[in-house]
Image: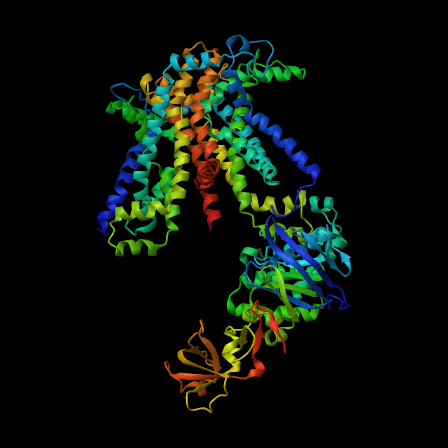
């Protein structure tokens, strides 16, 4: 095993803020990451999530607040002094170096003196140990055959692996990943998702992973931190985030198709706004099903059937509601519905999420 | 380059080195300007000082403008550079469009020819051109200054490279809308190619305003002198050491381009870089 | 309208002008180099390789060629090196960046003939600013433009002065093309600043631009003419005679056009070889 699995790599982010002139990119971020945890920072583009990661890496300086790793404050430390590794969106491989040389760079920088690097000389023992470590990391990622090649000769997925290898070889306390899968095609993305999650289990190091893709966040992480508009909205396990969101913004950002939003009065509730997941709406043909109880059924007209094979999503236009409501149905059961049919959507009140006018969750 | 800032020592060192360079780069311009303001006695004074102690500028500039018709030379320069650029655009754009977006027999041959012509420095063909113009009687005319440069293979090459990036759909849409091929060149391609056109324009104007070799060969009459010829003439035929008027004349000759450069600095640098890298 | 006719209309002006003003003259100059043509003479005779043979015995040509190579050999490394240094230093920090860029670029724009005369004035042995400065340091005076040992290097100095800014902007374009993430990866790997970063990222990434800049500067330097013509006329005693000036003198002072054409062919071979390298680099960087 490459990395001993004792607890190291606890990251504490405290009151962190970043401003560029008048624009506030990050505001009062508090986040405690347990050693060995896989935390995803999720948010729409431009929300400040990459900036947060870059501050942890030391590539940018915070305006206020602090970052510490295993209790040691990071303020003023250069990136290479933080015992972290980073995987970049574009992989950032050195194009003139071979794969093996790319992976060896962090080791050479650490284990050789400037003079030895300049002259290209290295004591045999050091050279041997660097070579061995490169080999072992390459074996772990199954890229041994690529070692003599240059980045230009690699596919996207191969570059991705090399970038991971370069990060792993230094055995960092914390892996920072900035949208590492966004340049891959859909199929490879699914594959690498599984591979990175598995790598995390193997290495036992802390992973801090930035993405705008909620599926990546939901499938890989122990916990997800949702950032919107520079503010931390919620930190929770994927499951809690989906079932029990703190704000309407989080509820809307997580989940496909989007959660249905209505005025509270529609369901006879006090809350300003209420939201219901598509799978919690039951569609019935008007007059066929038992009539819903007052205030718990919404009547509308079917405008679109989105058949995904495994699921059927019914888009139902309801007078006075701006966006069509979406209800999930069994494709077989939904066959009877035709466009233009009048439907009743039954709501189970236990699964209705209530929010105040500002979008804050109201819990019973 | 990324968020890493220089240390205070490095910042001071950077300014020190770059300022030294700036003195060397701008020194001649400052000396030129200051000398153009000095009276003769001061210019040849045994002790050099940068700023004029007494004003001699008026006399220098009047001498520069009257001893030779300097303003007329500037006008010649403007006429010649404008005519060259205009004709280059007229000839280049349709050809570049055809090379980039039309399929026709001989296209590859034509492009290969353009590439070969790109290798020919104009100084190398000055001699036969001189003979050609001599025998056709257009030597020593405006035409002789302009004609050889109406074809710019470099311009064709540059615009073709740019046109390659224009989506075919845009051209097909224009055809569906009933535009002729000429309308497409001037109404669709030219506007989208504005950045490249401006870059090429700057390159062309700078090159021909400053050119000395060809005017020296093609022109004998003073009425046709371009600014570089004018100032060389002033040097050789004035009292060669009358540096006051000479510096005044130099200032006048470089002012149009330098002013244009200072106003549109970014465009100039981009233009020269772009043409430099692509050519 | 979309057929063959329109293609002909689009390309005909360029094709005709290319034939008349480029291909024709190119073939003509090669043909002329095998003749004893003199301007105005009623006839010309074919002399075979005579012009080329004469060239090998011509001391002026030998000096001229050697001088041109020395000039190129000085201007290229110095102006490329200084251009790279200027680009790196200017881009290293935002302070006064625009001012420096404009200052270093100004000589590229300014009419060389005019600036050559300014340099002549500044280099004057008696009252020039440069010698005054040297005297203050206890050196000189030097008669830069009339000293046989100095004149070629003085002209090369002016050439460097004019070319640094040009090379600088080419390098700057190269620098902006280096992905930011590569610098950041280097920072994480421990090569975040100074020479380490230059060696790991900047220099390898500038490789193609450097080769390109060297070639383009060499071509420009080979074409040196303006400063020589207006400042030294190749003197003193041919110490600053360069190829293009020799060609000009043979063709337009002595009207030995056949011989000048042979010299042009030699000049052409140099330029074309360099240009071919340039096209090769261009083609490679594009793929």
Q: Nearer the viewer, residue B267 or C60?
A: B267
The vertical placement of A152 against A313, above or below, is above
Tell me, what colour scheme is on the image?
rainbow
In the image, what residue occupies the spot 54% across and 72% down?
A272
Is residue C117 shown left or right of residue C254? right
Q: Nearer the viewer, residue B210 or C74?
A: B210
Is residue A343 shown left or right of residue C190? left
* Residue C32 visible to an observer of this rendering: no
The x and y percentages for residue A18 are 64, 53
The x and y percentages for residue C28 are 31, 30
Is residue A95 shown left or right of residue C22? right
The vertical placement of C21 against A105, above or below, is above
Q: Nearer the viewer, residue C68 or B272?
A: B272
The x and y percentages for residue B45 are 57, 9
The x and y percentages for residue B213 are 39, 24
The vertical placement of B210 against A326, above or below, is above
Res C48 → quadrant: top left
Count of marks placed on residues = 0
Q: Nearer the viewer, residue B136 or B84?
A: B84
The vertical placement of C242 against C209, above or below, is above
Is residue C272 shown left or right of residue C103? left
In the image, what residue occupies the spot 54% across and 84% down?
A348
* Residue A234 visible to an observer of this rendering: yes
């Amino acid at each position: 095993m490459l990395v001993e699995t004792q607890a190291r790599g606890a990251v504490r982010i405290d009151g962190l803020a970043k401003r560029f002139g008048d624009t506030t990119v990050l505001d009062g971020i508090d986040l405690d990451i347990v050693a060995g945890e896989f935390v995803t920072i999720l948010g729409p583009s431009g929300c400040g999530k990459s900036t947060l990661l870059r501050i942890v890496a030391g590539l940018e300086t915070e305006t206020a607040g602090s970052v510490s790793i295993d209790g040691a404050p990071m303020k003023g430390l250069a990136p290479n002094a933080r015992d972290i590794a980073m995987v970049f969106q574009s992989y950032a491989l050195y194009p003139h170096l071979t794969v093996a040389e790319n992976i060896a760079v962090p080791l050479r920088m650490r284990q050789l003196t400037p003079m030895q690097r300049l002259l290209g000389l290295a004591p045999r023992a050091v050279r041997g140990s660097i070579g061995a470590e490169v080999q072992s990391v390459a074996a772990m990622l199954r890229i041994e055959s690529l070692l003599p090649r240059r980045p230009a000769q690699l596919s996207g997925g191969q570059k991705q692996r090399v970038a991971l290898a370069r990060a792993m070889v230094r055995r960092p306390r914390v892996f920072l990943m900035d949208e590492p899968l966004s340049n891959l095609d859909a199929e490879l993305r699914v594959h690498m998702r599984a591979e990175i999650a598995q790598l995390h289990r193997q290495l036992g190091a802390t992973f801090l992973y930035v993405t705008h893709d909620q599926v990546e966040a939901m499938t890989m992480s122990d916990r997800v931190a949702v950032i919107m508009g520079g503010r931390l909205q919620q930190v929770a396990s994927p499951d809690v985030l989906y079932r029990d969101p703190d704000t309407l913004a989080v509820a809307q950002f997580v989940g496909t198709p989007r959660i249905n939003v209505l005025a509270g009065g529609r369901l006879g509730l006090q809350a300003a706004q209420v939201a219901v997941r598509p799978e919690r709406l039951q569609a019935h043909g008007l007059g066929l099903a038992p009539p819903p109880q007052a205030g718990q059924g919404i009547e509308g007209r079917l405008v679109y059937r989105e058949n995904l094979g495994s699921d059927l999503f019914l888009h139902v236009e309801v007078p006075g509601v701006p966006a069509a409501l979406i209800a999930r149905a069994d494709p077989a059961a939904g066959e009877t519905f035709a466009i233009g049919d009048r439907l009743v959507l039954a709501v189970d009140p236990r699964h209705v999420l209530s929010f105040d006018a500002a979008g804050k969750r109201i819990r019973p | 380059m990324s968020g890493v800032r220089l240390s205070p020592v490095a910042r001071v060192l950077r300014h020190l080195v770059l300022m030294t360079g700036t003195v060397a780069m701008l020194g001649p311009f400052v000396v030129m300007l200051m000398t153009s303001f000095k009276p003769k006695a001061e210019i040849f004074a045994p002790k050099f000082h940068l700023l004029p102690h007494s004003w001699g500028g008026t006399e220098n500039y009047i001498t520069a403008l009257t001893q030779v018709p300097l303003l007329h030379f500037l006008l010649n320069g403007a006429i010649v550079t404008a005519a060259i650029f205009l004709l280059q655009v007229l000839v280049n754009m349709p050809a570049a469009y055809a090379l980039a977006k039309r399929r026709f027999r001989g296209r590859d041959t034509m492009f290969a020819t353009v590439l070969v012509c790109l290798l020919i420095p104009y100084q190398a063909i000055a001699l036969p051109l001189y003979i050609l113009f001599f025998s056709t009687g257009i030597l020593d005319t405006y035409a002789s200054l302009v004609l050889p440069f109406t074809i710019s293979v470099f311009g064709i090459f540059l615009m073709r490279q740019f046109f390659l990036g224009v989506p075919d759909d845009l051209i097909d849409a224009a055809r569906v809308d009933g535009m002729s091929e000429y309308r497409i060149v001037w109404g669709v391609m030219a506007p989208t190619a504005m950045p490249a056109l401006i870059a090429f324009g700057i390159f062309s104007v700078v090159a021909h305003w400053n050119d000395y070799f060809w005017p020296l060969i093609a022109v004998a009459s003073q009425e046709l002198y371009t600014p570089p010829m004018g100032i060389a003439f002033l040097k050789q035929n004035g009292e060669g050491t009358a540096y006051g008027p000479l510096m005044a004349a130099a200032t006048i000759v470089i002012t149009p381009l330098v002013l244009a450069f200072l106003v549109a600095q970014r465009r100039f640098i981009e233009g020269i870089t772009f043409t430099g890298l692509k050519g | 309208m979309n057929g063959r006719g329109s293609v002909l209309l689009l390309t005909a002006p360029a094709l005709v002008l290319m034939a008349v003003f480029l291909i024709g003259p190119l073939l003509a100059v090669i043909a002329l180099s095998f003749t004893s043509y003199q301007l105005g003479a009623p006839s010309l005779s074919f002399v075979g390789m005579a012009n080329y043979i004469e060239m090998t015995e011509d001391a002026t040509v030998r000096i001229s060629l050697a001088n041109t190579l020395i000039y190129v050999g000085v201007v290229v490394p110095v102006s490329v090196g200084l251009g790279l240094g200027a680009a790196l230093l200017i881009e290293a920090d935002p302070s006064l960046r625009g001012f420096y860029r404009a200052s270093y670029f100004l000589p590229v724009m300014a009419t060389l003939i005019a600036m050559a005369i300014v340099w002549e004035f500044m280099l004057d042995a008696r009252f020039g600013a440069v010698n005054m400065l040297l005297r203050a340091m206890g050196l000189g005076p030097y008669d830069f433009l009339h000293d046989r040992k100095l004149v070629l290097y003085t002209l090369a100095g002016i050439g460097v002065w004019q070319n640094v800014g040009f090379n600088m902007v080419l390098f700057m374009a190269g620098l902006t093309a280096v992905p930011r993430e590569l610098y950041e990866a280097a920072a994480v790997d421990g090569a975040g600043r100074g020479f380490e970063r230059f060696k790991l990222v900047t220099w390898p990434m500038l490789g193609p631009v450097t080769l390109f800049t060297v070639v383009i500067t060499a071509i420009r330097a080979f074409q040196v003419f303006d400063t020589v013509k207006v400042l030294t006329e190749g003197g003193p005693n041919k110490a600053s005679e360069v190829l293009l000036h020799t060609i000009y003198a043979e063709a337009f002072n002595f009207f030995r056009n056949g011989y000048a054409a042979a010299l042009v062919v030699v000049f052409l071979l140099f330029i074309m070889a360099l240009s071919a390298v340039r096209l090769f680099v261009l083609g490679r960087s594009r793929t």
